[in-house]
Image (tube, rainbow, N blue to C red):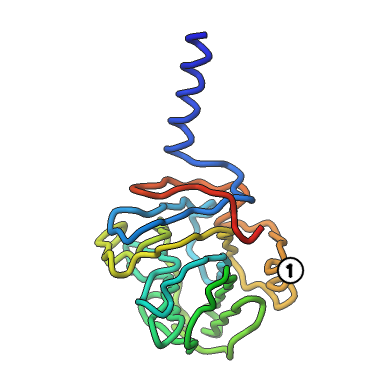
Amino acid sequence: MEKLLWCFLTMISFSQAFGHEDMSTWAFVFPKVSDTSYVSLEAESKEPLNAFTVCLRFYTALSTVRSFSIFSYATEKSYNDILLFWTKDKGYHFAVGGPEVLFTVSEIPQAPTHICASWESATGIVELWVDGKPRVRKSLNKGYTVWTNASIVLGQEQDSYGGRFDAKQSLVGDIGDVNMWDFVLSPEQINAVYVGGTLSPNVLNWRSLKYKAQGEVFIKPQLWS
């Protein structure tokens, strides 16, 4: 009996430290404003990126209240090597290597939202898809290379490599289905992801996720499943 109890407690401790391997029906929940609650993700690929696509779902009531971070990918080269950020009354800011573009959107519906963002160095073309619908393509940081050894954070924006969080930029709500590829997905592939496909992501894989949660972050069943 004592051995079984010890094993059970050990499993709980391991889960809290390293999370679920398969998060396919789960979401991270950030229940309140904080500058200490966040989730760190470990990339499967450690190579520099000359192209990428990142897709995820989030659910929040903040869009008409204030700005907040959606996806923060910092390196020692740039703490905004990749950033997806919602700015109140403006829309989605998408940064690569520091420079950014704005995709104008008045507000986010109070419903789970799916976004995919892609960029390629060869042309500088960036795309943003919201709930399976593309925004007009833009140009950003042509010829740049996203650096290695990334600090990838959900729930906060990094104003330095791995830290300097601002509670006024924190996410309050749910986030999940975070997947990332080292190439630009085609429109057909993005639509497949939008309806639930995975297409074997090779940078971040929600079905085989390496993560560490800090502060007041909870794992709950997805509200959009």
**Which quadrant of the view contains residue 224?**
bottom right
Q: Do we see residue 95 in this rendering?
A: no
Write the residue at 46% across / 52% down.
Answer: 41
Image quadrant for the C terminus?
Answer: bottom right
Is 203 situated left or right of 78 in this image?
right
Mark 1 Cα-neighbour bin, 10 Å: few <14, some 14–19, many ≥20: some
Residue 204 at x, y = what percent?
Answer: 55, 56
Q: Is residue 178 above or below residue 2?
A: below
Write the residue at 39% across / 65% down.
Answer: 171
- SS under mark 1: helix
Write the residue at 57% across / 62% down.
Answer: 180
Is 7 situated left or right of 98 in this image?
right
Q: How many badges with numbers are in the image?
A: 1
Residue 146 at x, y = what percent?
Answer: 44, 69
- Amino acid at the residue labelled 1: Ala
Q: Do we see residue 192 in this rendering?
A: yes
Residue 127 at x, y = what percent?
Answer: 57, 82
Residue 50 at x, y = what percent?
Answer: 52, 71
The residue lying toward the viewer, choosing from 18 and 67, is 67
Q: Residue furthest top?
A: 1
Q: Is residue 136 above or below residue 121?
A: below
The residue lying toward the viewer, choosing from 20 and 33, is 33
Q: Is residue 153 above or below residue 194?
A: above
**Which quadrant of the view contains residue 82?**
bottom left
Q: Which residue is denoted by mark 1 in the rendering?
A: 192
The residue lying toward the viewer, choosing from 88 and 185, is 88
Write the residue at 61% across / 56% down.
Answer: 202
